[in-house]
Image: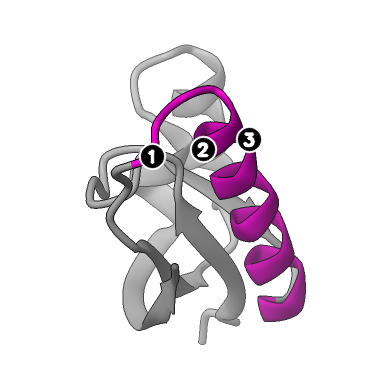
Amino acid sequence: MTHLEHIYAFQIIPGNDDILSFAATLEHAKAEAADHRRSLIESGDHHLGPTALYRVTIRPLSRPDLINVLNERDQLIDLIIVDEEFLGVVA
């Protein structure tokens, strides 16, 4: 049986799930998302939507998967993420 773990993520671009930033704990994800939002606002983006937070279920890599990642046949994120659960937003 595969041992699954959880990490946390937030949107780099509010409203867009294509690019996420990851953290070990929900508290770190919230703090990093708030800091990131502040920097976006300070750089002139004053019309941001909320930034989504997620709990991400990941699985360990098998040896064949690791070899495929190292040989650039597969993307790491596509192999390890099992599920993303929406937790809320930072606004």
Q: In which quarter of the image is residue 3?
A: bottom right
Q: Do the residues labelled 2 and 3 touch (CB within 8 Å)?
A: yes
Q: Where residue 68 sits in the image (x, y, percent)? A: 44, 26
Mark 2 and mark 3: Cα distance apart in space: 5 Å
Q: Does the magenta stretch include residue 22?
A: no
Q: Are the residues flagged by discs 1 and 2 in contact, CB closer than 8 Å?
A: yes
Q: Dot 2, crowdedness within 10 Å: few (<14), some or many (≥20)?
A: few
According to the picture, the residue beneath numbered tag 1 turns out to be 46
User: Residue at (63%, 59%) from the top-left corner?
Assistant: 34
Q: In this view, does 90 lie to the left or right of 28?
A: left
Report the residue at 52% width, 67% height from top: 59
Amino acid type of the residue that numbered disc 3 sits on in the rendered structure: Ser
CA gap, disc 1 to disc 3?
11 Å
Give the mark count.
Answer: 3
Start and end of the magenta stretch? 26-46
* Helix, strand or loop status at disc 1: loop
Q: Is residue 15 above or below residue 68?
A: below
